[in-house]
Image (spheres, rainbow, N blue to C red):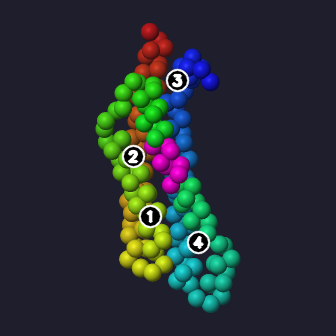
Amino acid sequence: MTLDSLVALKPYLSFFHPIMMWIVLAIALYALYLGVQVRRTRLAEGEAKKALVKGRFAIRHHQIGSILLAVMVLGAIGGITVTYFTSGKIVIGPHLFAGLGMVGLISTSSALVPFMQKHDWVRSLHISLNLILLGLFGWQAVTGVQIVQKIVSQMATNGAG
């Protein structure tokens, strides 16, 4: 791939990060669902527990969480890179800081996993960090849509002129 072909893709690169992040938000909500099922399984007894264990929620939650960590970190790097490539600068603002905070939260939450079996407070901290992460993610989605609207408006203005 040459630099000229990248320049040809430039107008479309601005949309890769937002689309990817909406997919990641859906994955995060699925991870939340699996986490709730893990908790239900841990607290259940008897036949209800046997039925829930068959869902393998803990394994699935761990796998989806690992994928989520990787894709979120790569998505943040990609978003910053595409912004720099398309505009020649990194826009310093709330969207960037919240995104970096999300990377910090998901990394910290993931780092707690090995300690959750022995300490209930660590499990509570893992859950709390992830709920804060989802809240920030929702806010990021709204501000991201605003940024995309601004990009589309600029593209329309530049295309008309």
Residue appearing at x 54%, y 60% in the figure: 65
Identify whether 126 is placed above or below 93: below
Gap in angstroms between the C-alphas marked 3 and 4: 41 Å
Residue type, mark 2 in image: Gly
State the image coordinates of residue 88 (x, y, percent, origin top left).
Answer: 39, 24
For marks 4 and 1, give the one nearer the viewer: 1
Identify the secondary structure beneath mark 4: helix
**For the residue marked with disc 1, what is the amino acid?**
Ala
Tell which residue pokes out farthest to the bottom in this image. Answer: 46
Is 75 magenta? The answer is: yes
| The disc label shown at residue 10, or none | 3
Specify whether residue 81 is painted magenta: no
Specify the segment rendered in magenta.
69-76
Residue at disc 3, secondary structure: helix
Front in this rendered view, residue 148 or 114: 114
Residue occupied by mark 2: 99
Numbered badge on residue 19? none
Residue carrying label 4: 58
Spatial CA distance of label 2 from label 3 is 22 Å
**Mark 1 or mark 2, which is nearer the start of the sequence?**
2
Residue at 42 percent of width and 29 percent of height? 84
- Residue type beneath disc 4: Ala
Q: Is residue 27 above or below residue 113?
A: above
Which residue is at a point 39% across and 41% down the rendered structure image? 143
Helix, strand or loop at label 2? It is helix
- From the image, give the main secondary structure of the stretch colored magenta: helix
Which residue is denoted by mark 1 in the rendering? 111
Q: Tag 2 or tag 4, which sits nearer the N-term?
A: 4
